[in-house]
Image: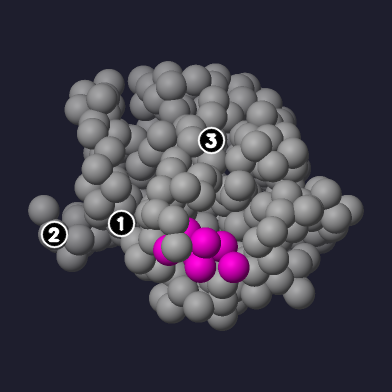
């Protein structure tokens, strides 16, 4: 299926949804809402979800209770979401893994597109390429020069095979024409520790997870992954500015519901999300960590998902990652 047909299908489905019956959602919500976060407590998605959930609850007039159901790249948690009754009382805050999983697993217990209703991309998280504070690599140019001189000797870590951090590294290898050795970890905390100690020479990490270490001088930031510089790291160049033309990669977080969510529910949730992502308290909490608030439309969320599935498939294929 081409990306054009895929996006068209997602957009058509969203349009049909928004024109559907609304009677069932007339009094929505009249009780607390369960928000599944299919990542571990303390992860970037979890931190964002808890801040946004508080604002959403205030806007909707009902508490939103966050529940972490982590493990297996978010599949078990998302499976509970797609199995829930489509009444708006069970939602999920998913991250980039949602679009990556179809390329990594031969068989999944749900369809990444057909079994969900996209509500809104709440925002994106830039990545930053880091090394130890006393690393010999003081710039991207230094790192790439070393990688080209001795192919395969320079290593880079990630939070796991097929993770957004892994694929960011694979994109760098492809764009820069270098060969570096990938070292997968089970999560990000141990990886951060090993980059700081120099056991791992470099890694892409989410800005919120390492902003404190970078600002304290415990990690050296070489470049950010976004097309433009990140406001909380104004002195750190982009990869494109550092000699890797066209490089752009970041992580995203989106609010979704089960398939066939009533039209009024979708409208209320999208409007509440948009309001939450403009809330001064939300912005004051998340922006200093590098988070970029969005709160876009349902159609935009569907288009993002479609585009990310296609881009991810290309990266997974290029990296030679075999589906499990």
Q: CA distance from mark 2 to mark 3?
A: 30 Å
Q: Secondary structure at mark 1?
A: helix
> Residue 144: within the magenta?
yes
What is the number of callouts on the image?
3
Query: Residue 80: image x %, image y %?
Result: 43, 20
Callout 2 environment at 10 Å: few (<14), some (14 to 19), or many (20+)?
few
Q: CA distance from mark 1 to mark 3?
A: 19 Å
Identify the residue position indicated by label 2 in the image.
Answer: 2
Q: Secondary structure at mark 3?
A: loop
Query: Residue 240: image x %, image y %?
Result: 51, 76
Q: CA distance from mark 1 to mark 2?
A: 12 Å
Callout 3 environment at 10 Å: few (<14), some (14 to 19), or many (20+)?
many
**Which label was assigned to residue 159?**
3
> Residue 134: within the magenta?
no
Mark found first going from the N terminus, 1 or 3: 3
- Segment tinted magenta in the rendering: 142-148
Q: Is 235 positioned to the left or the right of 87 in the image?
A: right
Q: Is 39 positioned to the left or the right of 118 in the image?
A: right
**Residue at (18% x, 65% y) in the render:** 4
Residue placed most toward the observer, 37 or 25: 37
**Residue at (40% x, 54% y) in the render:** 151
The residue sitting at the right extreme is 216
Mark found first going from the N terminus, 1 or 2: 2
Q: Main secondary structure of the magenta part?
A: helix
Q: Is 209 positioned to the left or the right of 281 in the image?
A: left
Instruction: Answer yes or no: is residue 38 visible.
Output: yes
Q: Are marks 2 and 3 in contact (CB under 8 Å)?
A: no
- Foreground mark, 1 or 3, reads 3
Identify the residue position indicated by label 1 in the image.
Answer: 311
Determine whether 318 is above or below 112 in the image.
Answer: below
């Amino acid at each position: 299926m081409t990306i054009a047909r895929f996006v068209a299908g997602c957009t058509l489905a969203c349009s049909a949804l928004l024109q559907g019956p609304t009677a069932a959602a007339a009094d929505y919500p009249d009780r607390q809402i369960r928000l599944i976060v299919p990542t571990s407590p303390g992860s970037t998605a979890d931190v964002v979800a808890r801040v946004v959930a508080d604002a959403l609850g205030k806007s909707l007039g009902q508490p939103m209770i966050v529940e972490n159901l982590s493990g297996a790249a978010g599949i078990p948690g998302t499976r509970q979401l797609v199995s829930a009754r489509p009444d708006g009382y069970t939602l999920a805050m998913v991250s980039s893994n949602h679009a990556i999983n179809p390329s990594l697993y031969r068989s999944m217990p749900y369809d990444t597109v057909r079994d969900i209703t996209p509500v809104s991309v709440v925002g994106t998280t830039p990545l930053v390429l880091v090394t130890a504070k006393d690393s010999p690599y003081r710039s991207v140019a230094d790192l790439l020069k070393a990688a080209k001189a001795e192919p395969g000797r320079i290593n880079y870590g990630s939070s796991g095979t097929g993770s957004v951090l892994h694929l960011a590294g694979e994109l760098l290898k492809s764009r820069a024409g270098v060969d570096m050795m990938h070292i997968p970890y089970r999560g990000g905390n141990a990886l951060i520790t090993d980059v700081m100690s120099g056991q791992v020479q470099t890694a892409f990490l989410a800005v919120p997870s390492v902003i404190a270490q970078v600002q304290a001088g415990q990690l050296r930031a070489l470049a950010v992954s976004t097309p433009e510089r990140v406001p909380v790291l104004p002195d750190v160049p982009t990869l494109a500015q550092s000699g890797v033309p066209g490089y752009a990669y970041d992580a995203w977080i989106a609010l979704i519901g089960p398939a066939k969510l009533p039209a009024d529910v979708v409208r209320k949730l999208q409007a509440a999300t948009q309001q939450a992502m403009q809330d001064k308290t939300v912005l004051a909490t998340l922006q200093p960590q590098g988070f970029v608030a969005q709160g876009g439309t349902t159609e935009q969320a569907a288009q993002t998902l479609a585009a990310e599935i296609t881009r991810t498939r290309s990266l997974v294929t290029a990296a030679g990652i075999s589906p499990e």
